[in-house]
Image: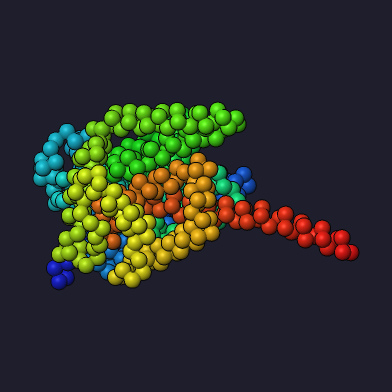
Amino acid sequence: MVILKLIDGIDWVIFDLGDYFYTPVLIILILAFGFMHQKKKIEDNPAYKYYFAGLATKILFSLIFLLIFTEYYGWGDTCDYITSSMAVSKLYFKDSEQWWMVILEKVEWEQSLYYLFNNDTGFPAFHMWRGEETRFVIYISSIFSTLGMNSYMPTTVLVAAFSYLGVWKLYLFFTDYFPHLMKQMAIAVLFFPSLLFWGSGVMKDTYTFAASGWLVYNIYMIFFRKKKIPVNIILSLLNGLIILSIKPYIFVALFPGIVVWALFRKVKDIKNKVLASIAMPAMIIIGFGITMFVFSSLESEMGRYGNVDSAVKQAQTIQQDLSRSEQYGENSYSIGTIDGTFSGMLKIFPMAIIAGMYRPFLWEARNPVMLISGLENFILLMMTLWLLLKLKVIRFFQYIFSDPILLFSMIFTIFFMFAVGMASANFGALVRYRIPAMPFFAASVFIMLDKYNQYKKAQELPEKEEDEEEEREEE
């Protein structure tokens, strides 16, 4: 049983026997399975050479994440999620009928909080139980709490191992398209420090990051590879449900990019350039219609993000909340006020994109976690500026519009980074919120670097052949 003690007004976690004895056993079992799975798959797919290392690194970072919040800060959202999921897990063994009442939400949350839970089960965190999104995370996490013997570390390890499935699927998606970039895609998807840190603990971001990657893989397998279609349809619906239930705005940013990717791929398959140029406008209209139809059909599921007005109001609310220095310290930033007008949105668009992609800058980092993010951002910024310089801007966009995957990744990145850069107003929130788009952004940079290198080699080849011919003539 987890014990809490109060020191200087802060609740500190004391780990129990399950944390100290069950955790090592669990990690050994998971890593043993990962090693055997890699050994089985690597003969057919060389990309699996990174499977075990990616899994081990993710588990390591999940524990680092937990320990920073329990041992350094003393508490955090991840602790609230775990203790709340423990309460739901214990409720099942106390009274399964009441558990089903809670899961199916047959009673109001106030009643379920005060009348179904007690001192034996523990109580879910009050501020999290009120929200539909956070309550959904608690429900999912309660499965892992049960398997983790209602202990902090095992629950965290199991969530990390489960979420790795979605992250790995995203890696397989990129390496299937770019098999010669396995190492680069591993860096972008599996080993990016901020993705490992913020996307491995028991948090919203871990589930939505994994679900987003897995959903993209499902779409790819259904419509492009046409493999295991029934399984991938079911999994795509489940992953879509997770995203819509936790962070609907991710779906709002992701879906238009998926539509563009699918339709643009069809246009690229048309060999006749005249037909392709005719088909492009038609595909744009079709894509817009599909997007509007899906968004209108899912308006109730997307909640506050179901229409533009309510989405902007929600962004205003989030921005105002996250900019409160008394709550979030001096870790905030400002790109201007969201006034809800079209001209106002255009005005802050460039600064929001820069914030989403590249901030905090190195000099804005106030702690070691922000410093790591600042270093990542600095490297990505330098790589982007180098590409813009070498490609003369025009070829930069030519590359994007020449490759369906690159176009999809950049559309999702720009939409998403604009949204989080506009609304976050706090670096701590920003580095968490943007992680679903970070692997797409980093992968895009690596893909364009590769395209540039191929272009340079193609230019150098005739010169090399000419030099060799001159040498032969001289001989």
Coloured how?
rainbow
Q: Residue at point 37% right, 63% down? A: 373
Describe residue 425's horizontal placement relative to residue 401 as left or right: left
| Along the viewing direction, whichever of 173 and 419 lies nearer the viewer | 419
Tell me, yes or no, if residue 203 can be seen here. no
Q: Is residue 13 above or below residue 399?
A: below
- Please tell me in which quadrant of the rendered image residue 139 appears: top left
Q: Is residue 250 above or below residue 232?
A: below
Q: Residue at point 21% right, 51% down? A: 338
Describe residue 349's horizontal placement relative to residue 395 as left or right: left
Q: Is residue 56 above or below residue 275?
A: below
Describe residue 123's horizontal placement relative to residue 453 as left or right: left
* Residue 428 x/y as whole percent: 28, 61
* Residue 248 x/y as whole percent: 29, 41
Quarter of the image with the C terminus is bottom right
Q: Residue at point 32% right, 69% down? A: 365
Q: Number of marks in the image? A: 0
Quarter of the image with the N terminus is bottom left
| Along the viewing direction, whichever of 311 and 88 lies nearer the viewer | 311
* Residue 333 x/y as whole percent: 25, 62
